[in-house]
Image: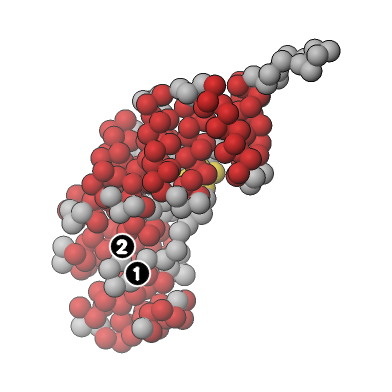
Amino acid sequence: MPSASVGRPADPDFRRAPAWAYVVFALLVAGVAAGGYWLKSSPPSAFGGPPETVQRLLARGIAAHAAGSYDSALALYGQVIQREPGNARAHFNTAQIHLVREQYEMAESSYRAALDADPDFAGARMNLGVALYKQRKFAPAAEQFRRVVQASPDDPLGLFNLGISVLELGQDGEAVRLLTAASRADPKRDDAFYYLGVALVHLGRLPEARSALQQALALNPRHSDAHAELAKVYRSQGEEGAARAEMAKAIELNPRFKE
């Protein structure tokens, strides 16, 4: 999905390793290259000029959005929607701001409006799944991500998001299949290997879990949760020294593991 990421959320609670805290999503904020969104309005007349076109209002909203002036952007997107209720981009960009602000119910509503206007808007469907996921509505989130994957079977982000959603639903075997596919589609995704390891631990497939977690750490040696999860695997396999070493690394990276 996306052209610009909002960044990685906070680490999850190790005791539950909740996938929801790591859900990956990105902003599809239209940029300067957004073609028609940058159409200029007609020259003003001697009597003050015509009202701004919808395209110009949207362009101004996009510019404010890109500059981080979210309140101004929301006001401009609102004017667009008032004049053109079926403007999918204005609904979508409104949702993006709510998502960044962690106003997930409002984001959900605006993404749904974008999809009502354009049912094929893949970015809106992906991020609707994210908004649902962040509300811990894992089954509806999985349904949205599943539709993304059905339309684009090799999309690594869709596969990952669906994988961690079904992991939260306790569907560990399906999670392994999806997260394996996600890691193959994007072999540099350390979080895909991490959650693959978590799912494999749930299934008792410890040698495979060990391999997946080691790969996550090869990609990101500072992944504290992967160190902690690998420590559990080592301990389960009777390798107490290796388990202590991994847990020490986890604590060094994130003192919360002392608790």
Look at label 1 and name its amino acid: Asp
Q: Is residue 188 above or below residue 16?
A: above
Q: Quadrant of the N terminus?
A: top left
Kindly indicate the quadrant of the structure image that contains residue 157: top left
Q: Position of residue 225 (x, y in %)?
A: 37, 70
Q: Position of residue 21 (x, y in %)?
A: 38, 60
Tell me the quarter of the picture where residue 120 sits.
top left
Residue drawn 52% across and 44% down? Answer: 97
* Residue at the spot 47% in from the left edge and 76% down from the top edge: 253
Choose the circle earlier in sequence order: 2 or 1.
Answer: 1
Task: Determine which residue is flagged by label 2.
Answer: 18
Q: Residues within 10 Å of mark 2 (few under 14, many from 20)?
A: some
- Taking depth in this image into account, of 132 and 167 the one nearest to the observer is 132
Label 2–label 1 contact, CB within 8 A: yes
Quarter-wise, where is residue 153 in the image? Answer: top left
In the rendered view, tell whether residue 200 sits above or below residue 256: above
Residue underneath mark 1: 13
